[in-house]
Image: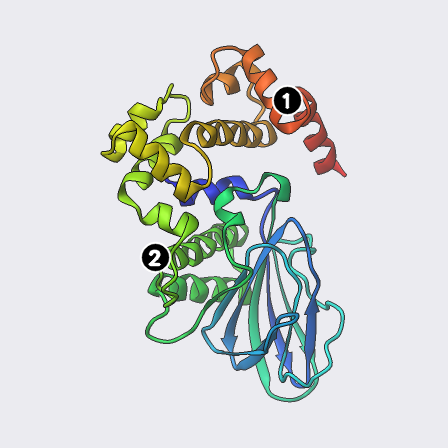
Amino acid sequence: MDVLSDVITIMRTGRPRSARVEWRAPWGQRFPSAPGSAGFQVVLQGSCWLLPPGEPALALSAGDVVFFPHGHGYAMADHPSTPVTEPACDPAEERGLFASASVGGQGASTVLLCGGYRHDPDRAHPLLRDLPELIHLPAGPGLNSEVRAAVHLLGAEIRQPRLGADTVVSSLLDMLLLYILRAHFSNDHGDCQVDGWAAALADPGVSAALDAIHRDPAHPWTVAELGARAGLSRAAFARRFAALVGQPPLAYLTWWRLASAGRLLRETDAPLSEIAGRVGYGSEFAFANAFKRDYGVAPGRYRRTVAECVRE
């Protein structure tokens, strides 16, 4: 798997949530801060205003996409002067995979597609932590065609669910998130600043090393071997990797192995010995020690705790 695919796989706990809401003026909706979540809003029809706290209001029109990677609070309204109310629709809190509703007054209609993802903020991939508070992909010729296509399909499926809708909507939500991140990292939205993980993914050598780690985390990688993948000397590669990714190559490799193990513990019944081998540890004992140092609990206890939370 490539890095972006892995980030989406590893970031979610549970299923994503989504809703298609028709708002009629006057309306104002507050979306409170929700640590451990990431969400997006897409304007399917009409126009509205995004009201981020402490920032100028941002006018949105049909086709605009806004993504909030860190769960920071914000509000949306038909006009900046309209009072905002507490949530009538918060997809991150809804139990169903998707919903459809009509809210507000009797005036002009605006249709929004909103979605939310739950994740563990303490175990977020550093790529996500490196993202800005808000990613805005304006509508128009510059908007990534893949984003437009995913938005169109998702909006249609939620508006009129058919057989297999659960699988289709869940897959389309993941696709939309991937396309938003792809557009951001490829600078399709017109922001010329490229640093951090955006620069790491754009760097051919560092990107090749990251791809190797993600495709085969169980391999006994060395800095020299990863440097060869990057086409750089050991020392030059180590410096460049640390500068762009934010940690040395083998530190990131260890982090990724344990993050992958955490996902396997949450989502599978595989025995600890099998998980240890799949993420690059020679024995269950070595894996358990490394996991406990990083997570603070033994792998078996972690699996039981996650299962108990799901049942609740």
Residue at x 43% of width, y 49% of height = 196
The kind of residue on which mark 1 rests is: Lys
Instruction: State the separation of the CA atoms marked 2 and 1.
Output: 37 Å
- Percent coordinates x, y for residue 183 in the rendering: 38, 59
Observer-nearest of 188 and 145: 188
Label 2: which residue? 186
Residue at x 62% of width, y 82% of height = 78
Q: Name the quarter where the N terminus is drawn.
A: top left
Residue at the left extreme, as displayed: 231
Q: Name the quarter where the C terminus is drawn.
A: top right
Residue 239, compared with residue 287, is above or below; it is: below
Q: For the residue labelled by badge 1, is the local secondary structure a helix, a strand or a loop?
A: helix
**Whether residue 210 can be seen here:** no
The kind of residue on which mark 2 rests is: Ser
* Dot 1 crowding, Cα within 10 Å, few <14, some 14–19, many 20+: some
* Dot 2 crowding, Cα within 10 Å, few <14, some 14–19, many 20+: some
Observer-nearest of 206 and 10: 206
Which comes before the other along the chain, label 2 or label 1?
A: 2
Residue 25, compared with residue 1, is above or below; it is: below
- Percent coordinates x, y for residue 132 in the rendering: 52, 58
**Whether residue 205 can be seen here:** yes
Residue at x 39% of width, y 33% of height = 214
- Percent coordinates x, y for residue 83 in the rendering: 73, 81
Residue at x 53% of width, y 13% of height = 273
- Percent coordinates x, y for residue 291 in the rendering: 59, 23
Observer-nearest of 307 and 202: 202
Could you say which disc has been placed on residue 292 in the image? 1
